[in-house]
Amino acid sequence: MTAVEGVAARRLTIVVGITGGIAAYKAVGVARALVLAGHEVHIVATEGALRFVGRPTLEAISRNPVHTDLYEGVAEVRHVALGQRADLIVIAPATAHSIASLAAGLAGDLLGTTVLAARAPLVIAPAMHTEMWENPATRANVATLRERGVIVVGPATGALTGSDTGAGRMSEPDEIAAAALRAVRPQDLAGRSILISAGGTREPLDPVRFLGNRSSGRQGVALAEAARARGARVTLVAAHLEVAEPAGVAIEHVGTAAELRESMRRLAPDHDTIVMAAAVADFRPRTIAEGKIKKEAVGDVLTLELERTPDVLAELAAERRDHQRVVGFAAETEPDAEALRALGAAKAARKGVDLLVVNRVGWSEGFGSPTNDVMVLDRAGSVVCTAAGDKLSVADRILDALA
Ligand code: CTP
C-alpha cells in the first residue's frame, strides 16, 4: 500500500485546480494519483493552465470533463456547484498570481468561485521561481492562507525551469496527493487533548551566546499538525522552531529548559496526552555572565562549568494523572538496530513513559531532515511499530500507536 492509498477509505469528490505555470504538466500526476486511490476527480483549469497542458490529457486522466469557463454550465450553477459538492480541493500548481487571488478572495474565474463556494479543506502546492516565492508579497499571501487553515505542500528546493535552482519547485505529485488526502482524515482523536513540546532549548552563556542543539522542531510540529487534523485539541510548547508554526494549535513559546519545564508542568494537568518531542538541554551553564565574555579576560582556554537540568519527561511521567498518557523521544547515535532498541527499552523504563519514539540521529540523519525513521517502543521495551518517511507520515504512525 502506498502513502496515497489507504488514507481515506471513502470515495471522495475532489476538485483539482490547475493554474498557469510550467509545473501544470506535473498536475496530471496529482490527478492520476487521486483517481488511482479511488476518488472522483473534477479538474478546474485556468486558461493559463491549458497553455501548458492539453484538455484531452486532463480529461483522459480525470475521466471527467475539464472545466475552465465561468459562463459554461450556467443552468446548473456550475460556478458554485463544483465547490459545494467537493470534499477536498487541491490546487497544483499554485502560481504566485493564484496564491494572491486566493488570499484576496477573488472570484473572477471558475477556480475562484469554486474555492469561495467550498467548505472543504483546501490544499495548495506552490510552484514558482525562488525570487517570487521569497517576495514579501507572496510570503504575506501564503501566511494569510495558512492562518485560514489552508494546507501548503512544499515547495521543494531543486531545479527550476531554465538554468536556476532553488526553493519554488512544485512538490512531487504523489506527495501532494498524499498530503491532500491526509487533510480529510477521520476524526479519530476528537475529544482528546494533546500537549506537545517541540524544537530545541538554548541555554545562555552570556547576553549574546548560548549552548543549543540541532533540533528544528519539524517532527514535533508534524505531530501537532497531524493530531489537529485528526480532531484533537493541541497545545504546542515551542522552543526555537525552524519551521512554520502549525495552524489551529495553541502555541506557547519558550527558550530555555527551565522555561520549557515550567510551561509543560503548568499545562500538563489540562491534557490527556503529553508528547515530549523537544530536544531539551541535559546540561546548562552553572552561571550566566552578566556581560559579554571577553577573550582578553579569559585567555586561551575557556572552561565552562555545566550543571544537570531536571528531566522534564521523567517528572511529567511521575506526576501523571490517572489515564494520562506520556510519550517520550530518544535521539541516539547507535548504528545497530537491536542495540538501538535495547538503549530505547532502558530509557523507556527509566523515564516511566507509555511510549518511547526512538530515532537515530547523526551528523546527517534526524535533526533538520524532512524525513525520519523511527521505532516506537512500549513501556516494556517491545516494538509497537516502526515508521519511515516524511515527518507527517511518521507523525500519523506515532498517533496510530497512541490511538
Ligand atoms: N528530556 C527531558 N528533559 C531533559 C532532557 C530530555 O524531558 N532535561 C526528554 C526529551 O524531550 C525526550 C527524552 O527526554 O523526550 C529523551 O531525551 P534524551 O536526551 O534522548 O535522553 P536522556 O535521558 O537525556 O539520555 P541521554 O542523553 O544520556 O541519552
Image (tube, rainbow, N blue to C red):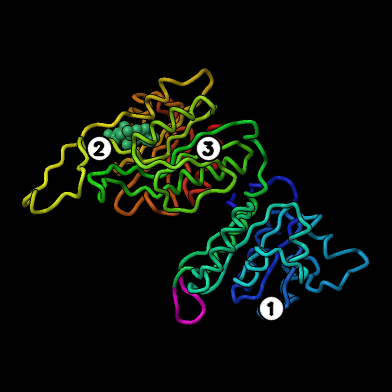
Res 343 seen here: no
- The residue lying at 42 percent from left, 33 percent from top is 328
Label 3 crowd bin: few (<14), some (14–19), many (20+), radius 10 Å = many
Residue at mark 2: 284
Q: In the image, which is nearer the foreground, mark 1 or mark 2?
A: 2
Circles 1 and 2: CB atoms closer than 8 Å: no
Give whichever of 121, 108 is nearer the camera.
108
Q: Verify whether residue 243 appears in magenta.
A: no
Residue at mark 3: 235
- The residue lying at 78 percent from left, 64 percent from top is 113
Residue at mark 1: 48
User: Principal SS element in the magenta part?
Assistant: loop
In the rendered view of the protein, which quadrant contains the C terminus?
Answer: top right
Residue 310: image location, x then y, percent: 31, 28
Q: Secondary structure at mark 1?
A: helix
Give whichever of 254, 368 is nearer the camera.
254
Marking on residue 163: none
Label 1 crowd bin: few (<14), some (14–19), many (20+), radius 10 Å = some
Disc 3, ligand 1: is the CB inside 8 Å?
A: no
Residue 314: image location, x then y, percent: 37, 26
- The residue lying at 49 percent from left, 69 percent from top is 134
> Which span is picked out in magenta?
158-165
